[in-house]
Image: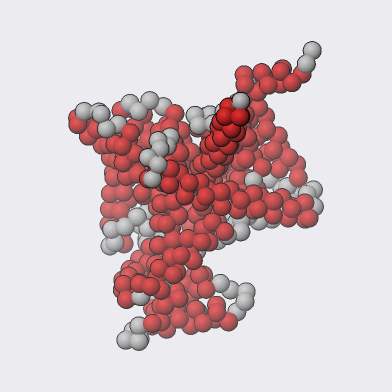
Amino acid sequence: MKTAPLIKNFIKTYPLIIVSLFFISSRICTYLLTSFGWNLCSDSHDYVDLAKRLLNFNLKGYWFERTPGYPLLIALANMHLYRLALIQVGLSFLTVLLFYKIAAKTVNTFQAILLAILPCVVINFHFYEIMILSENLAVFLLTSICYVFYCKEQKYISLFLIGLLSALLLLTRTIFIYITPILALVYLLENQRDSLKRKIISVLNLTIPTLIVFLLWSSLNKQHTGYFTLTNYLGINLAQTSVRFYESDSTDNSLIKKIYVKHIHIAEKDKTKEIKNAIWDAYDELLEKTRMDLPDLSNELKKKSIQLIINNKILYVKQAAISWTEFWTNKMYCIFVDTRFMSKNLYLYWRTTSHILQLTFNFLFILATLFFSKRFLINKEKIPFQVYTSILIVILGSLLQAIIIYGDNPRFSFPYYPLIYLVVFFFFKKIINRVRNKYQNKINVSE
């Protein structure tokens, strides 16, 4: 009996079992070779602090640095961080299964399995499962949104569920504020024949949850700090974006400018520092010497940075271009504190291989975006809405990040990895089919 047909039939019949086994095996290997648990970094403390406040229903004195999406997950784990790591592994498992379902809508079963396996081998997926950071939850929520939007019939209840998930995603990472309007636009494009009443109700189902959570959290911020915004880090982010021309205003002799520019010059001379982190190097000194709290300091930085951006448009575009490039090219943000039985060389090889793999997918995604844009705009070719929606989500996310923040870009790009993989695989499928058709046509002509 031939084994090849049996294997092929098993793959077609039980793809989710194959994906599940691969995921479980990869996580067991991670546990055996590394010190599985949880790890804290500098940003983790903000999330943990807010989680404690949410459990105590007390936001008095809080500066609203973070939104409550990820802290709610920490609170759900009852502040038990080892339990939180296990929950995050579970979210990764669900992400992989949902991703397979999404992929199976655009490519064949075998290709969909390969796509779903990628999150099992790329080191960053393992890393964010044990870090107290929002990326693991963000990638799960974004994948869940795409699963319901791509794979389920767009009934009112499905659209409302997408709206709820989008609201949670916004509360997890504020950069995703654009997801709801993008999905509403795609829905309208794909359902132009619907009645006006259905369009209005559907768009309201998509947008109202996000609008409600935006208003509620921003209102709470206004009540406690005096500023109507999702996060009081916005001014800090804009100060990062204007870092290369922050001292260009000769009329500004403020204490804030003197301290920030001092740290910019230090970063330029010190090879161990990066200029993009100069505002964070200056952060404690700014709070101490200006005697401001974060909301007031951030507001001052926001006003100053916006004015500098208006007055230095070309420099700002150059800076945004640098940020956009780093979105695609930055090294992976991962550090295992204790690799246990894994040799350091093996760990570095895994990390380097994952980085090269991701850079390759990022490059191919840009090529795919150009290819599909040409086919759609010039050749008027119909592109599956799952593909062009994924392209819109990733490209707009990268651009929005670039114009607002100049910081740790590997964290910003991670939630988009599954969508990048999906577009690249469909791109390959399209190219292979075109080559095959041309070859077949040549054979028919020669005959």
Q: Quadrant of the N terminus?
A: top right
Where does residue 242 sit, x and y in percent of width and height? Answer: 41, 72
Q: Quadrant of residue 434?
A: top right
- Up the image or down, 289 lies above or below 351; here it is below
- Up the image or down, 152 lies above or below 216; here it is above
Side of 100 relative to 234 (left or right): right
Side of 203 relative to 388 (left or right): left
Q: Nearer the viewer, residue 320 or 79?
A: 320
Where does residue 89 sit, x and y in percent of width and height? Answer: 60, 39
Residue 326 visible, this orientation: yes
Where does residue 157 sit, x and y in percent of width and height? Answer: 33, 27
Residue found at x 44% / y 61%: 402
Residue 94 visible, this orientation: no
Where does residue 413 sit, x and y in percent of width and height? Answer: 51, 52
Q: Quadrant of residue 247?
A: bottom left
Residue found at x 43% / y 43%: 375
Residue at the extreme top: 1
Number of labels in the image equals: 0
Q: Nearer the viewer, residue 1 or 322?
A: 1
Residue found at x 45% / y 81%: 261
Side of 186 relative to 331 (left or right): left
